Image: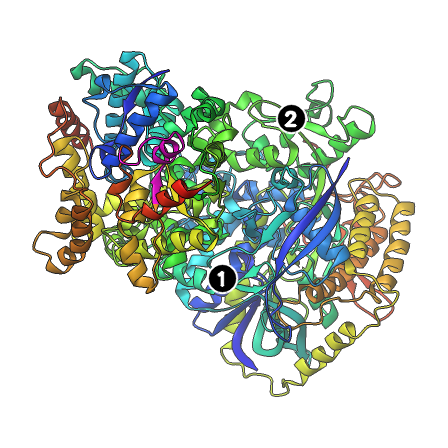
Amino acid sequence: MKYAFYPGCVARGAAPELFASTIEVARRLGIELDYEPMRGASCTGAGVLQEKNQRLGDTLNARTFAMAEKAGLPLMVICSTCQGVMSQASKRFKDDPAYLAEINKDLAEEGLQYKGTVEPKHLLWAIIEDIGIDKLKAQVVKPLKGMKLAPFYGCYIVRPSAALGFAEHPEREDSLEQVIKAVGAEVVDFRGKTLCCGFPILTINQNNALKMVANHTLEAKGNGADAMVTPCPLCHLNLDGYQPAAAGLRKQPIDMPIIHLPQMLGMAMGIEPKALKLNKHLVSTKKLLSDLVLAP
Amino acid sequence: MTMDVTLNVKRYNPDAAKPASYNQEYRIDLEDGSSLLDGLIKVREEMDGTLALRCSCRSAICGSCAMRVNGRAVLACNTKMKDVMPKDGSPVKVEPAGNMGVVKDLIVNFDVFWGKIKAVKPWLQPEGPVPQGEYLAPNEAMLHLAGVMGCIMCGACVSDCTVLEVDKNFLGPAALAKAYRFVGDPRDAHEKDRLKDLTKYGGMWDCTRCMQCVQVCPKGVDPMGRIMKMRDKALAAGYNNTYGARHALAFTDLVRHGGHLDELRLPIKTFGIFNVKEMLKLAPIGMRSQMVGKVPPLFPKPIPGIQNVRRIFEKVEAKR
Amino acid sequence: MFDHDVLVIGAGLAGMRAALAASQAGVNVAVVTKVFPVRSHSNAAQGGINAALTDRGDKWEDHAYDTVKGSDYLGDQDAIEIMCKEAGSEIINMEHMGTIFNRDAEGKLGVRAFGGQRQARTFFVADFTGQALLYVLHEQVMKSGVRVYEEWFVLSLIVEGGECCGAVVMEMKTGEVHTIRAKAVIMATGGIGRVFEPSTNALICTGDGMALAYRAGAPLMDMEMIQYHPTTLKSNGALMSEAARGEGAYLINKDGDRFMKRYAPNMMELASRDVVSRSEQTEINEGRGVNGCVLLDCRHLGEKLIKEKLGQIRQLGIDFANADMIKEPVPVRPGMHYVMGGIRTNYDGLTSIPGLYAAGETACVSVHGGNRLGANSLLDTLVFGKRSGQHAAAGVKSKQHAAGVTDAYSEAEKKKIQAILDRPADGGELFGKVRQELGETMNKYLAVFRDQQGMETAQRKVKELRMRYEKVIVHDKGRTFNTNLIFTLELGFMFDCAETVIVGALERKESRGAHTRTDMPKRDDANWLKHVVQFRTPEGPRIEDQPVKITQWQPQVRSY
């Protein structure tokens, strides 16, 4: 299956391990990621641009959609935030064709036009809907048996459900749990799994952001998780990068590794941890990996 | 047709010798189309009179019966029992609304809620001579406000707000939506004062954009969308010296410049390079990132065709 | 003990308007309400509020005539004149305070058509006009600094030396019983909907104010006049606003026939509510209904109009009747909605007890007579709420608190409550089934069509139910939010109201407005152009007559 690939800013910036592990895992799942048509695609706006000027964000996303449409390929993303922001824009275009027509006027100069056919799809959803859980299972050579993983979705891939097609795709609601089970790990349920990680207010109200990090990681830990898995690199940045600070705030160690979705898949597929850049985390994954090696 | 339902209700009796919350199961027979509220009323009217909850209109307009069902805030009256019965046959989990503090069973304390509503000066403040007849106002503006006016103060958004969970000082989605109702009213003469107040700590910039309020609002009020509109208005009004405002402006600027997010420059631009306190706070994560060899490109190249992105910025921004 | 000049009981539109008016007059005002103000049932009013704005060519006299005719000539015309004259300034006043109101192309207040009126003069905010008005008054009351005792429940009124001078009240959060001393009390507690099952009314509409005033010695008037709204949902009795028909919706029977052409050829679906409800019930009774309902057909109004102006009731249809009015007709039937009768007052809101006022649905001024026009109830609450507040405030300025009011009043109420809590558990039942049977009895025998035999059956049954009620037990013995106790007390109020509805209906030997007797189908102006007034005695209601005030409109044959 071939996709126009939109990695998003963070996978090419502060979370290179997400990009690397995605490439590795896609190859094994028979997913062809075509980055060429998307080379000139911009940031989605991440909801920040939208708060300043929604139409601006929508125009940029229509531009991105038009690029995928022109290539005649479905669009894949690997970031919950990209997914959500694009889905919301997509819904506005569908609900209001006149609005899209207006936006298309601003794309015309570049020779682009968006007809409204693109459905941005996260790797997580693509695995379930396009690739199939069975095909994933077939690639698992090193089941993550005994590993307890807490899913952490990131807001934008679960809310608002009306924009995310949950009605037509009810399987999206527990997609992360399904994938965790498919690679042989145990799902650790916890209340925080669909709550905010705190990233968006990191530079605005850091104290609140850190409290969120502490709450979620400690809750997952309290429920017995060995690590948390997330399809959102922004959640990763916060939960991983600011975990030491959150631990300081709570005056207790946390040490909860935060694994990107494709890193988890890659581990189960027997891909070298180094190739998955599992050594590029601020919260060490060493213990997790040694447990995996030792597991019977 | 009737159905057999088991409710697992989180209870709390403050009058008990040692008050502590506990769960109680009720098994009831209900007609097929019944609401969750029908079930709870049946319990309290026919089985267990001690079960306390607020409810009144049964048609999603009075705002009394917000509570959590299976972990999510809903109005009990417009929630069909069938829709919340777990497929595995386990009981329907009913809990009081979150973030407000329980008084008894499903009744929570609304004192802070009303206090925050009052804090946004929720009354029209026109200026100048009062006209003989009505104030003239465009219907579109009124219809737009009707969307916010639909708020029934049920507290579902407050219950599930992720910021309130960590910071009681946050005004919260309901009060901020109420504030927007006046900020957006063409008859109100104090838009700027209001916006200025709302840019303070606890106001519009403390929202994380997590969309919980959008998701759980039973009336489609879209509190978060209103908060975003206020941010836009606050920036336009020149209140751009908070971290929130600077973050939005810096982000926009970076995307305009390079077409993508530049994680390295975003906090620096937000805080200001000479902001020693905040820069020092960034130091540990910077050093840790260095140690694991994880540093975003120092001078990221703009995306190909950046001139098109910049042109879109110019064109769309000019339309405002 | 708390002291206030004016104590308002109830925080719906009438109560808040009264509180605001009294507070603006410079006296110390407090409001007691058993729910948070915005939870009051005024918020459920959907369609709009009537006013003849003279600057756009409408005449208050036309509005008054429509109201008189709508009342089937039982409304007091002096009060109706006042209401219609003051309507315009009240609407403008509400707009100035912040009500958004839908607008016309020039940005002025827009109107929609409503039942029983020859001119479109209903001002509205989409289909949640009541909520929009209530919230604005709530905002103004917050701003005014008027003390609001939220979630406090009134147990009794205090009458000393023939004057009302306070109330005994329970703070629901703590269970504490307090005496509130006041120089004037304004009752604004709304209707008695829950006496009927089902009803469009909220669960809080239990007739508290009427029963409290009645027990304190004030008479109730025209209690037999119960309005059945033509468009309510079968499942839970929820209201589908008259605004739907105001915007042009049809009523059709199972054959798709717009049957109103046979009952009200001129006004069709927009005839008076009593007329439309009778027509629907006749269709249903004669086998032309659909599962006990007729159909409200909005499809031809189009998606845009429905979403803009009827969005809330569309959602109600989807939630509670599984029908999206954009795509399909919604099954509706007549449902108990409003009581035209209530505590007798003059047009300043003053009851028969000095110091005691009443306004809104709990009062009977009477401006609605035998049948209320849609969108006149909100107007009633504002005009007479304001007048009560002003009159009460003027009256208390030179008045001292009654010296005899002490905490002994609250001690007496505490004892009564303790006696209920101490009832032996054996053989007693919870209040729920008694309430249910009371409501079903009333709804069966005092509905759109009534007759002697049915009403007598109801009277007997209600008497039996009251005996069961006297033994009802309360499971909850705690103090904090003892809702079990509150509901039990409310049920007591409901029995007082039910009894007077039945007695009034048995007394009125004719058909007029909402009171339609199949055994006496004609209106009888010679004998019954008068109000039925009931005073409480230990043996049951004592009845007096009161003539209808006629100013300029003599009774005529009523057709639409």
B277 relative position to C35: left or right: left
Q: Is residue C89 above or below residue C306?
A: below
Circle 2 packing at 10 Å, graded few (<14), some (14-19), many (20+), is few
* Residue type (three-letter) at the residue carrying disc 1: Phe
**What chain does badge 1 belong to?**
B
> Which stretch did the figure color magenta?
A258-274
C479 relative position to B246: left or right: right
The quadrant of the image that shows the N terminus of chain B is top right
* Residue type (three-letter) at the residue carrying disc 2: Asn
In the rendered structure, does residue C501 fall within the stretch colored magenta? no
Res B148 quadrant in image? top left
The residue shown at (23%, 17%) is A37
Determine which residue is flagged by label 1. Answer: B110
**What chain does badge 2 belong to?**
C
Determine which residue is flagged by label 2. Answer: C266
Along the line of sight, which residue is nearer the eye, C110 or C416? C416
Circle 1 packing at 10 Å, graded few (<14), some (14-19), many (20+), is some
Residue A292 is situated, as x and y percent measured from the top left of the image, at 40, 41
Q: Is residue B292 above or below residue C344?
A: above
Along the line of sight, which residue is nearer the eye, C450 or B23? B23
Name the residue at the bottom extreme: C403
The residue shown at (32%, 48%) is A239
The residue shown at (32%, 46%) is A286
C527 relative position to C417: left or right: right
In the rendered structure, does residue A271 fall within the stretch colored magenta? yes
Residue C225 is situated, as x and y percent measured from the top left of the image, at 74, 49
From this viewpoint, is residue B143 visible?
Answer: yes
Along the line of sight, which residue is nearer the eye, A193 or C163? A193
From this viewpoint, is residue C193 visible?
Answer: no
